[in-house]
Amino acid sequence: MNQLTRAEEEVMQVLWDLGHAFVKEVLEQFPEPKPAYNTLSTIVRILETKGFVGHEAMGRSHRYHPIITREAYRKASLSKLAESYFEGSFEQLASCWMEEKGLTLNDIEAIKAMLNKKSK
């Protein structure tokens, strides 16, 4: 799966939240200062070329929708991160996360419960 630029990820976050949207509706979701309409339209078309977004024609306009789910992109991104920076080891990635963010006993218990549930 292709990696997205920061701007592309921001647009995808909006499309994942909205489900279907015209460029104007996506633009409305951005904080000030908003990107130019033409810039946003170009990003959406790039996302379509990359296979992340599809569209349906609505008169002279297009309504866009995500093709790739947020979860699928999240999994692919996490795998790429682990491979690129942690020698493919999720243990090393988790260890780094623990050192950077710190985990509470409640966090650790929640992770243990999730792992126990997965192993059943």
Image (cartoon, helix red, strand yellow):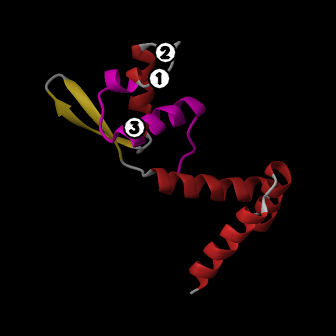
Q: Quadrant of the C terminus?
A: bottom right
Relative placement, left or right, of 71 versus 58 is: right
Q: Is residue 118 above or below residue 94?
A: below
- For label 3, count other residues whose C-alpha is less than 10 Å away and answer few (under 14), some (14-19) or many (20+): many
Q: Position of residue 61 (x, y in %)?
A: 21, 24
Q: Residue furthest bottom?
A: 120
Find the distance from the CA under tag 3 to the CA under tag 1: 12 Å
The amino acid beneath tag 2 is Lys
Find the distance from the CA under tag 1 to the CA under tag 2: 6 Å
Find the distance from the CA under tag 2 to the CA under tag 3: 16 Å
What SS does tag 3 mark?
Answer: helix
Residue bearing mark 1: 30
Q: Position of residue 104 (x, y in %)?
A: 78, 59
- For label 1, count other residues whose C-alpha is less than 10 Å away and answer few (under 14), some (14-19) or many (20+): few
**Residue drawn at x 42%, y 25% as measured from the top left:** 29
Q: Is residue 18 above or below residue 84?
A: above
Give the magenta range: 1-26
Q: Position of residue 66 (x, y in %)?
A: 37, 44
What SS does tag 2 mark?
Answer: loop
Residue bearing mark 3: 15
- For label 2, count other residues whose C-alpha is less than 10 Å away and answer few (under 14), some (14-19) or many (20+): few
**Residue drawn at x 38%, y 30% as measured from the top left:** 45
The amino acid beneath tag 3 is Leu
Residue bearing mark 2: 34
The amino acid beneath tag 1 is Phe
Query: Do the residues bearing badges 1 and 2 touch, measured as CB atoms within 8 Å?
Result: yes
Q: Is residue 33 above or below residue 99?
A: above
**Residue drawn at x 72%, y 64% as measured from the top left:** 106
Q: Position of residue 74 (x, y in %)?
A: 55, 53
Q: Majority secondary structure of the magenta segment?
A: helix
Return the disc, 2 or 3, that comes first in the chain's sequence: 3
